[in-house]
Amino acid sequence: MNTKGRTTRIKADSTPEKYQNILNIINEEIQNPEGSFTSEQFDDFVFNILMYDNTNYEYVLRFNEFFADSEMSVNKVHAHLKTNTSLQFNKMLTEKIDFGKKYKLCTTRVEFNQSKLVACHLIIRLGNVEQQYGFTNFFACITVDIINRLIIIRFNQAQLEVFCKEAKKEQLALINELKEMLSGNSSNGDDLSPLSLNVNFLDEYAGSTVIFNLFKELSEEAEEMLRERIKPETEEKIRKFLIDMGLKKIEDEYIEQIKAVIYQDVANTISPSLFKKGWIFRFHFSEGDHTRATSKHEDRGPIYSSKTYWQLKELIKEEMREGGYHWKMTKTDEFVDVKIISRNATMILDYYVQMRKDRKEKDEFVIRKISEHLS
């Protein structure tokens, strides 16, 4: 948000003083009729920072009951949320919040698209965590995705790790607590019971199947590009070579293994800009009792020049524990890098730090991709 003279007004000798100056400026601007922003604009700014820009780690679950569907009118949705005051409907985050409860619902918002309900958003304060410059509030930022029938629970990963460590709590235990709270099944969930929400974990293999299908989708595009770049007579030359080496029976897998060596070399010549949909930059799966994994480099470039990729890809049988995807977003020059993990009947979305620009749009893009393959 743009504020006149903010550089000189924020200047301070210490970080606490700097934050106090920022708070003073915010209050001055809100109270000034000709200020740079209104309290409503600042509230929207804070909401989006908490819900999207400050979060980079998400758990995905399902739900099968909710008080509303996409066809419920705007007036009926608003009336239900206003009547049930415990839901804190549209409560501004700039107002004082009583943090008396263990987990406190701070605000509930709804999102419509052409008069159709598409999402319900909740921000829940879980406690505070100590960071470099002191204690800060720690939130779970939750979306009930009406269109895709999914629950997305967002965190700041660094804060999540500190919170769970200090509480001596596993992350899955926290997720289970939030699941029960959202469903109105615990003392923390009393305020949320008017949502009539029933949250479920995913089916046992749902997440690993989605990760495989996303892997397959990007792999097929990349491998088609590679096939187009090798000479038509390559396969016949490989077959002749194997015959000359004395092999009596030429299996297709022998030919594919030799072609894989060629693909690795060709992949080094392909510019990442030529991949239309994007690429895979890592994957991880288990075969029996042996865990196998591969990844490119820290720059998250295409994996297709990696020997390990070609050695392992044929062993993957419709399930994967983890995949790293670089997707090019349609109708824009933006991209999204995300690692998706299947664990404990949930999917975890681990976004990379560069994803803060257009964070909401990128989040929705990834959720749509997942939903396409989630049966």
Image (cartoon, rainbow, N blue to C red):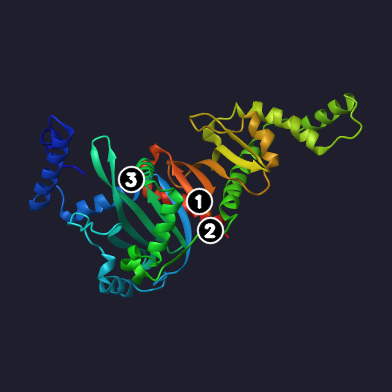
Residue in the picture at 58% in, 45% down: 321
Residues 138 and 76: in front is: 138
* Badge 1 vs badge 2, beta-carbon distance below 8 Å: yes
Residue in the picture at 58% in, 30% down: 270
Decide: few, some or many residues near mark 1? Use Cα within 10 Å; few <14, some 14-19, many ≥20.
many
- Give the SS element for disc 3: helix
Quarter of the image with the N terminus in it? top left
Say which residue label 3 marks.
Answer: 53
Please state the horizontal and vertical placement of residue 203, each as a whole percent of the image: 57, 59
Q: In the image, 143: left or right of 292? A: left
Q: Earlier in the sequence, mark 3 or mark 2?
A: 3
Residues 305 and 46: in front is: 46
Marks 3/2: CA–CA distance = 26 Å
Q: In the image, 273: left or right of 109? A: right
* Mark carried by residue 202: 2
**What amino acid is labelled 3 in the image?**
Asp
**What amino acid is labelled 2 in the image?**
Leu
Q: Earlier in the sequence, mark 3 or mark 1?
A: 3
Q: In the image, 49: left or right of 328? A: left
Residue in the picture at 66% in, 49% down: 318
Please state the horizontal and vertical placement of residue 267, each as a whole percent of the image: 62, 30
Say which residue label 1 marks.
Answer: 347
Marks 1/2: CA–CA distance = 8 Å
- Residue 288 appears in which quarter of the rendering? top right
Residues 119 and 207: in front is: 207
